[in-house]
Image (spheres, grey):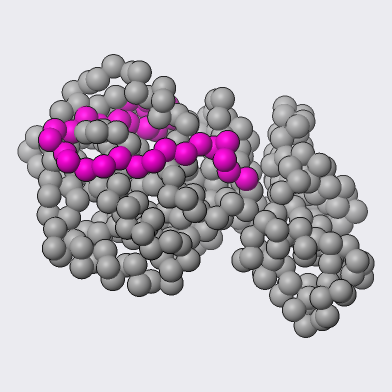
Amino acid sequence: MYKFCLLLLSLLMTPQAHAFDQQMLIKVFFNIVQVHTANNSNTDMGLGSGIIVADNRVLTNCHVLKKAETAWVSQGENTFSVEGVQINGHQDLCLLTTKDMPLKPAEIGSIKDLKTGTEVFAIGHSSGTLAPTTSRGQIKALYPFEGSQIIRSSARFSMGASGSGLFDDQGKLVGINTFKSFGRIAYFYAMPADWIKNLKTLPLQPIAPFSQKAFWEDSEHSPFFLQAAMPEIQNRWPDLLKISQSWIAAEPDNAEAWYEQGLAQEGLGLDEAARLSYEKTTTLNQRHSDALFHLGILASKRGDRTEVHKISIALADIGSDIAKEFNIATGCEQRPTDDC
């Protein structure tokens, strides 16, 4: 544990960690464990992350456990055996029951407290590190799904961090980091912490391999927000326009569907159509920072400095990082405040 604490102190000195309250970060770090899996012959071993959500209960992703015949969790040099698991393979959430684990649970938040632009941070064992690492970001999108919302954030994570925690600036667990899109420019997705309540009602099972696909692994029934991800990342605007139009037809009150349509239209040079789509987005979600950002870019292209100034103020109310990025993109940092 001494070595673990030294690593923890070094992580608290990083710029990412300095953005948040240090006492709160220390508390949250000790809510995170590393999840270890193996088959009976120890020839197929795996690593993931987990969050303590109740006494002797660790939340992780089911895909971490798919091939496991045995599992245990660790924090620093301390290890704790796993006696069983509650499984929701479709939602990719598994709740491990541990034995004699004297570690405190995280405070559980809710998706209801999140808005686009909310600052969050991810903590988990990215790349299999002994001590958890932290990354800072913002909520980029909230996708309605099965009675809750899937979170997309800009808080980065990598292999080994499946099952890690996404926390708000109060240190409350709001999401479980689960998967990211492929490629150098990646999107990072988390399951909502609100799903834990139902998971706790499922039967306890022994650790054993299973084959059920998570919804995000099922390409034949992929939700619209996942269908749109790669065309957006790869600037395939005709494909994105087609998907977004189908999405709007199915979910006309979904702000993200209208935003994706606007993005495709802007990419195709249809600026006026894009403006109308972004305005519809902000009608449905007044704090949609990306839609506001693009509306500001279009206003800047038209030479409408009054509108640019208005959007700059709105973005500053959402978050300092995106406001700064916007002011750089529109040249506002080079102009007097009343002109931007």
Q: Which residues are magenta?
A: 87-115
Work out which residue is located at the far left of the displayed protein and give it. 41
Q: Name the residue at the bottom extreme.
A: 334
Quadrant assignment for the C terminus: bottom right
Report which quarter residue 77 is drawn in.
bottom left
Count of marks placed on residues: 0
**Against 114, is 246 above or below?**
above
Nearest the viewer among 28 and 131 is 28
Residue 291: x, y in percent?
Answer: 75, 52
Residue 12: quarter of image: bottom left
**Would you identify the image quadrant in which residue 91 lies?**
top left
User: Residue 246 placed where, x, y %?
Assistant: 73, 33
Compared with residue 162, is residue 110 higher up or lower down, i.e. above or below? above
Q: Is residue 110 magenta?
A: yes
Task: For residue 38, say whether it is visible.
Answer: no
Q: Predominant secondary structure in magenta?
A: loop
325 in relation to 63, above or below: below
Residue ID at (20%, 63%): 5
**Quick check: 137 left or right of 107?**
right
**Residue 108 located left or right of residue 295:** left
| Quadrant, the N terminus | bottom left
User: Where residue 210 sits: x, y (%)?
Assistant: 28, 26
Residue 164 is a magenta residue:
no
Which residue sits at x=54%, y=42%? 151
User: Horizontal and vertical percent for residue 217?
Assistant: 45, 35
Does residue 90 appear anywhere in the picture? yes
For the point 32% across and 53% down, the residue is: 27
Identify the residue at horizontal 59%, vertical 52% (top origin): 118
Judge left or right: residue 69 versus residue 165.
left
Viewer-proximal residue, 1 or 206? 1
Relative to 215, is 101 above or below? below
